[in-house]
Amino acid sequence: MALRLVSDFDLRKDVLPWLRSQRAASAAAGARGGGPGVLENNYESLRILNVERNGDIIYTYKDDKGNVFFGLYDCRTRQNEHLYTFEKDLHVVSCSVNSERTLLAASLVHFTKEGRKNELQPGSKCLTLLVEIHPVNNVKVLKAVDSYIWVQFLYPHVESHPLAENHLLLISEEKYIENIHIQVIQEDGNRVVLKDSGHLPRERVAEDFVWAQWDMSEQRLYYIDLKKSRSVLKCIQFSADEKFNLMFEAPLDITLSDSGFKLVNFGCDDLQDQENLSKHLTLCVFTNHTGTLCVCYSPKFDSWEKITYSVFYFHKGHSKTFTAALGSVDSHVTKGLTFLNLDYYVAVYLPGHFFHLLNIQHPELICHSLFLTGNNEVVDMLPHSPLQSLSGSLVLDWCSGKLSRAVLNQSYLLQFLWNTRLDYEKMGALHCVLSWGQDHPFLEAKIIQWISENISACHSFDLIQEFIIASSYWSIYPETSDMDKLLPYSSVLAWNTEIPGITLVTEEIPLPFMKVHSFKGYWEKLNSNLEYIKYSKPHLLYNNSMVQREWHSLISEEKTGRRRSMVYVRNILDNAMKVISNLEARNLEPRLTPLFREEDNPQRLLMGLMVSELKDHLLRHLQGVEKKKIEQMVLDYISKLLDLICQILETSWRKHHLHPSVLHFRRASAAEFTVFHIMTRILKATTSLFLPLPPGFHTLHTLLGVHCLPLHNLLHYIDDGVLLLTETAVTRLMKDLDNSEKNEKLKFSIIVRLPPLIGQKICRLWDHPMSSNIISRNHVKRLLLNYKKQPRSSMIDKSPGSVEFLPLNYFIEILTDRESSSQALYALEGHDNVDAKFVEEAALKHTTMLLGL
């Protein structure tokens, strides 16, 4: 199952045994009333009423006489506590307890046996009561009206000392919300009573609303009112300083009835007819710590063949409306659509039909989410009873009395990655795993193992690219949530492939209008997201285009022997050294692959340039982050990129039991072909993104290529730039290969493809007429550069043993004269053992070979 519900609380396991023991103790003490078996007969009356911000769970049950008991379960201490008993047969609508557990607020109604729970009987009253429970003392009637009332105490973020004043929200079916100020005092030691029960100040918080949702964790009230038949979402933030502020207003393009009334997360929705959930709209607001603001909406069902739901990504400035096919007309929908908050994701769930994991952090492309239909067993993994999504991935199942924490099942998703054949499912599952297992070595190792065995399995995107970009992103994302605007999350920029069973329409939406001007915490991040949408054009995502241009310039200078300021180049190479040191500090285990064993200046230059460019990019756009921290984030990010490449290689080498000795030239095995293919795919993935490779990668790749490929294929790979002829690789070839006819052809083909400076060095390592010929040609070319013909004597001095071949003698004399000049000597500095005599001998040997003598 892709989603698991990890139980935090269960009425049957955490409350029922305690109630039985309480009953048994009462019976043993001779207390009046039923014995332990009485509660069993009334178990159906045991239900959850509310979950408070501090984790306290309030529940109720009735005894055989109809008396209403209120209890509290403390999730921190795992202890139960009896709060209060009403000795009347009443139905509890709502209940809340203050943070000190000194006051209990409850709203209760009378029901006739013939009456329905969702209707008040004529003449009946809804009583809203405030009870002193530390100890049990006075009861104050707050309201007695013919409409339902819900109650909710506010929980300030400061809980270190008792509060002199408590605040209680009253939510009326008449579409208004009041905030009641309740002052308490201590008498006779620890006894807490109302200070002035006859006068409890109250103020209107909201009115004329048609929908409201309570966020218990963040103490926020979301509600919708209708202005000229247009839905407007508003949010009120309650603060620890006993104040509340209207934070924003946002227009919503949804249809709501002025006569409707819907509450979300104000305790148990026991009054609603659960059998007809599919006939009602579903609407909820989800946020997370990164400043996301999502409104999930599903209208009333109007078809058994498809279902439509919308998600308004206010933090991104657009909405997406999804239409999911439900299969046959006979597959009736009897349950409502469920939205669950999973932090970086929102789960949309219709039992027996589909399960949709929506990526709310990066919702732009549908492939970054995961859509599973009735063909997958996953769509029946959750309870079919109505689920209520609370803050912090908490899920409440009112029917079973269970409070659980929803988590993505990493084991299932990894198995799903192995088994699915669809690219969009691979993409979606990959991002789910990485976002939930941020920088988790075990998960990364499993994904790398999957990649190494399915290297060519994806056709719509590059698997290696996607993995190293996404995993590197998540490795430093926790440092600051602004990274989603500054670093690439995916290698895929567009997705045009349809996903079977679902269609979507994307639309721009008006941004929320912020009503305050000073922001902290979540509101600061949300405002930053909104400001980014308004003003950041073009997008600020980092790319290596600047690095690419500068790197090509430096490499060109190196090839021609020219080099700009040595201080500049030294700083770049120092940056690279910091990355390598940072990488080695993170990985203490010895590597099997022979990487990081050579200088590899081109890759070090690329690495160092990326450090410099990325650091400048983050310093420009990250506000309020120390320079030292940014520098470390850059080192960690680039180290992570390189480390992932090393891990992919290391996994392949270990799987195929390769060893550095494999590079001794002999017949290649199937395992070596496989590793060569994986290295080629890594090279392709990094080249298109212009990412650095571990120093020594090209050398290793080239040596494996020589080992595995026929000569014509090898030269084709070299000419196309797939294999790079590094100085280390060519030196190894010249030294390790003998001068057989086949190897001579290989060596010569490689030497003629080398840049001049490297070629000159390599020729000196090969004791062969071919290399002598090349050295001589280069020597003559340098000597005669800018040579101007001078009048010369017709007499040629012949040295003893000279050849009777006038053209050669004349040519050698010119070379000797050029060598004798100080300018030529300066130009030839460092080229020892090469002179006119060497050229003469090489020319004669070459002529002899051509004549077959």
Image: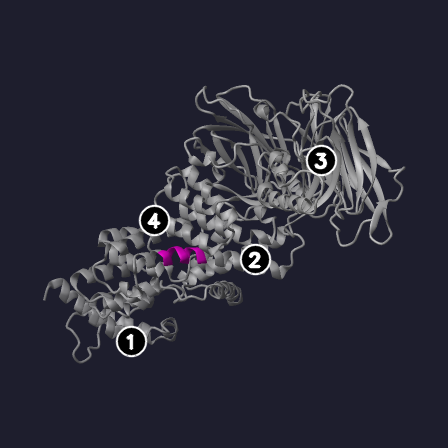
Quadrant of the rendered image containing residue 388: top right
Q: Is 440 placed left or right of 294 in the picture?
A: left
Instruction: Inspect the image, locate mark 4, and give the three-letter code of the amino acid beneath it.
Output: Glu
Range of magenta residues: 643-651
| Element at label 3 | strand
The local crowd at label 4, few if under 14, some if 14 to 19, many if 20 or more residues have their Cα within 10 Å, is some
Residue sitting nearer the eye, 662 or 146: 146
* Residue 840: x %, y % from top left: 22, 71
Q: CA distance from mark 4 to mark 2?
A: 31 Å
Q: CA distance from mark 2 to mark 3?
A: 58 Å
Label whose residue precedes the other's in the sequence (3 or 4): 3
Q: Is residue 461 magenta?
A: no
* Res 653 label: none
* Residue 532: x %, y % from top left: 64, 42
Query: Would you say the magenta stretch is mainly helix, strand or loop?
Result: helix
Label whose residue precedes the other's in the sequence (4 or 2): 4
* Res 453 label: 4
The residue where tag 3 is placed is 68
Foreground mark, 1 or 3? 3
Instruction: Inspect the image, locate mark 3, and give the three-letter code of the amino acid beneath it.
Output: Val
The residue where tag 1 is placed is 833
Residue sitting nearer the eye, 447 or 301: 301
The residue where tag 2 is placed is 633
Label whose residue precedes the other's in the sequence (1 or 3): 3
Quadrant of the rendered image containing residue 696: bottom left
| Element at label 1 | loop
